[in-house]
Image (spheres, rainbow, N blue to C red):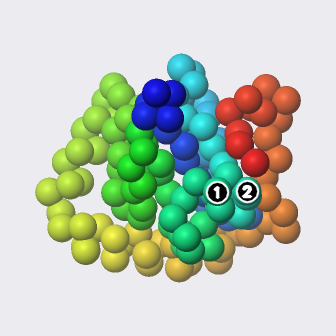
Amino acid sequence: MAEARERIIFFDGVCGLCNRFVDRLLRIDRGGVFRFAPLQGSTAHDRLPIGLADALSSVVYLREGVVLTRSTAALRILIDLGGWRTLHRLWFIFPRALRDAVYDWVALNRYKWFGKREVCRLPTQEERARFLP
């Protein structure tokens, strides 16, 4: 039953924007709701549908057994943080195709705008329990 409530955020481990997003989530998510795994890691290859872990242009959110991607994943993560962030539901009034087009444009330029690391992010000692390989 633990898997039914599980919430894992899969991210591009070498992407500067993705790592900043994870850093921010770690600060905000004091209750430890989310766990994190790089798309380049074994958890992504074991838990996600074939080929999705290789699609590094999207954040992937495994939420209670359902796989969400792109703008839907990003918005659902923010909403799941609770509080005022639930206002992000309003973005769902826009068609998914439009939201995903904006998401894809940012994803296409993220390395240029936010940089790219040589290796995947290594969690600190305090963060290790929240990260999966």
Cβ atoms at labels 2 and 1 below 8 Å apart:
yes
Q: Quick check: 84 left or right of 128?
A: left
Element class at badge 2: helix
Q: Quadrant of residue 23?
A: top right
Depicted 56 relative to depicted 90: above or below: below
Depicted 12 relative to depicted 66: above or below: below
Identify which residue is drawn at 54% across, 59% down: 48
**Residue 32, image x and y in percent?**
57, 25
Residue placed farthest to the front in the image?
1
Residue type highlighted by circle 1: Asp
Residue type highlighted by circle 2: Ser
Q: Quadrant of residue 112?
A: bottom right
Q: Quick check: 86 left or right of 23?
A: left
Cα–Cα gap, marks 2 and 1: 6 Å
**Residue 29, image x and y in percent?**
53, 28
> What is the number of the mark on residue 7?
none
Q: Tag 2: Cα neighbours inside 10 Å, few (<14), some, or many (≥20)?
A: few
Q: Quadrant of residue 44?
A: bottom right
The residue at which mark 1 appears reads as 46
**Residue 68, image x and y in percent?**
40, 56
Identify which residue is drawn at 84% across, 63% down: 119
Identify which residue is drawn at 20% across, 55% down: 92
**Residue 58, image x and y in percent?**
51, 66
Q: Nearer the viewer, residue 15 or 54?
A: 54
Element class at badge 1: helix
Q: Nearer the viewer, residue 68 or 98?
A: 68
The residue at which mark 2 appears reads as 42
Q: Quick check: 24 left or right of 89?
A: right
Instruction: State whether residue 93 appears in this view.
Output: yes
